[in-house]
Amino acid sequence: MNTREKILPREDLRQRLAEHRRRNQKIVLANGCFDLLHVGHIRYLEGARREGDVLVVGVNSDTSERALKGEGRPILPAEARGQLVAALGAVDYVVIFDEPNVEALLTALRPDVHAKGPDYTAETVPEREMAARLGVRVAIVGDAKQHSTRDLLARLREASHA
């Protein structure tokens, strides 16, 4: 499948996931901004994929990322970030979302697992209560948080001023 074909509007994705459910496949939802892909993102998404059969990745829209990360972000527009994520072998589908968290996606898509990176604990996942109400298991996946886009951008800015 072409990477652009993996990026679907929410309603189209809901229909596609219904087909996977009929085949008894476990669906995992991961999410993030993915402004500059780095090894931490890869390890997070590969860890998320190990939690099920189908990996859906929610990518924050430009408006959503700007609200979360501040001025100067995103570096890349949502469509480009979505296409980069879709190109990864572990990823089956990408959906771009405007909300500040994925509660609306959890409600609409009803995955079996909601995967969050290691910068969260079971107690700090913003959507933990919604996931519990929906019967969605929360999994913390990926390696220890040693990689961040913010740190990478700071190093790039330092290097350009040197």
Image (spheres, rainbow, N blue to C red):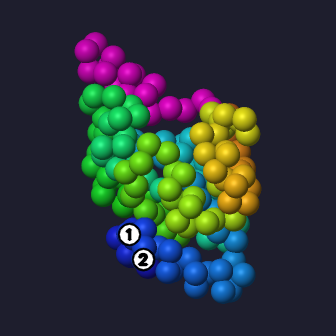
How far apart are the alpha carbons under marks 2 and 1? 5 Å
Q: Is residue 89 visible?
A: no
Q: Position of residue 135 (x, y in %)?
A: 73, 60
Q: Amino acid at mark 2?
A: Asp
The residue at 53%/70% (across/down) is 92
Residue that sits furthest to the front in the current view: 133
Q: Amino acid at mark 1?
A: Pro
Q: Which residue in the structure is indicated by mark 2?
A: 12
Q: Is residue 103 visible?
A: yes
| Quadrant of the snapshot with the C terminus | top left
- For label 1, the SS is loop
With respect to residue 141, does 96 lie above or below?
Answer: below
Q: Which residue in the structure is indicated by mark 1?
A: 9
In-image side of 93 versus 141 (left or right): left
Q: Position of residue 60 (x, y in %)?
A: 40, 49
Write the start and end of the magenta stretch as one range.
145-162
